[in-house]
Amino acid sequence: MLYDLARPFLFRVEAERAHEMAVRRLEAAGRSERLTKLLRARYFMEDPRLSQELWGIRFPNPVGLAAGFDKNAKLVGVLPHLGFGFIEVGTVTSEPQSGNPKPRLFRLPKDKALVNRLGFNNDGADAVAARLARSARDMVPLGVNIGKARKVPNAEATADYVRTFEKLFPYGNYFVVNVSSPNTPGLRELQQSGTMEELLRALKQKNAELSKAQGSKPRPILVKLAPDLLTKDLEQLLPTLVAERVDGIVATNTTTTRPPGLRSRHVPAEGGLSGAPLRERATAMVRDIHRATEGRVPIVGVGGVFDAEDAWEKILAGASLVQLYTGFIYGGPATASDINEGLVELMQAAGYEHIADAVGSAA
């Protein structure tokens, strides 16, 4: 309720500046043991009916924070206290980069959406690795989203992804290969099946080498796809992902399309659209992937998740886990907690004893 009252004032602040302010406040909160305990007591929910084990990793609940909010892994010690069952940091690139010129983040409040053209602005793999080495990150699973540096040509993309993966390998419970952001020129071309095959094989080989050298298990590797893939392109790509034994698929990234009926003044802004207008397309893609892979590849559903009904829709379509970013911006600190509580109610009403039983039941 307090966030609902404060949001109109927060939304008067330029979007990226407001985000930076929020990151600083959360960083400060994470340094206070007393405050993190209060947050955890208020927001964190751990219910055995929501807990799952995927890729040998235990997720206390299925609601995660998507990449993009904590690009530089500054908040891994505090975000889990807000009720998220897992956190994904990044996108991280091999070298630091400033991203695209500002302004590059826009709110569309009438449409419950955002448009961003940030362009993988981040501190780089070395800085993020050093920060994670100092962080307490064992509360919930941590995903690391990795992308291609802007200055690296696509012909050298595989080596660039492998460099980033190697630097961050000790710190992520799983990794997401981001080949679908619309804000790095040419990046989405890496979704072509032949290029994807080369990239996944190189990452899989490095994964095996590093796990053997460090005496640890290989890290699950997921691929994040664009919602703008044509059906024929998705049909060509999925067999490659299955053949290369990708561990999971994140569906979806932001969209470059603008569905009819949007009303906010920033609709024409260049960049990727996220939030409520993406919900139906993202859910349809989750369903298509679940059907095409016959449920053999776990899916993380992203796009337009604001409440428990949105998350439940994606779970029924085939998502084992869901993520949100825009929904968190609009909903505030109680968002993940409210979704988890609502999922328990929806699950009980539908007669399911465990969240995993519902995955894909409507696909």
Image (tube, rainbow, N blue to C red):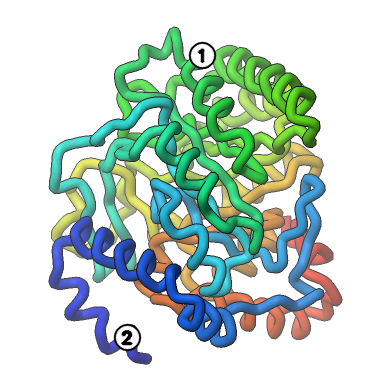
For residue 309, what is the image quadrant? bottom right
- Residue 210: image quadrant is top right
Front-lying residue, 178 or 212:
212
Q: Quadrant of the N terminus?
A: bottom left
In depth, the one of 216 and 358 nearer the eye is 216
Q: Secondary structure at mark 1?
A: helix
**Front position among marks 2 and 1:** 1
The structure residue drawn at horizontal position 75% and vertical position 71%, both measured from the top left corner, is 50
Q: Is any part of residue 108 visible from this angle?
A: no
At label 1, the amino acid type is Ala
Residue tagged by mark 1? 159
Q: Is 186 situated above or below 349?
A: above
Give the SS element for disc 2.
helix
- Give how far across and how far down residue 350 sits, in percent: 77, 79
Hey, what amino acid is under mark 2? Asp
Residue 197, position in %: x, y?
64, 16
Residue 159: in sight, yes or no?
A: yes
Rendered location of residue 124, percent (x, y):
38, 33
Residue at screen point 44% across, 33% down: 125
| Residue tagged 2 | 4
The C terminus lies in quadrant: bottom right
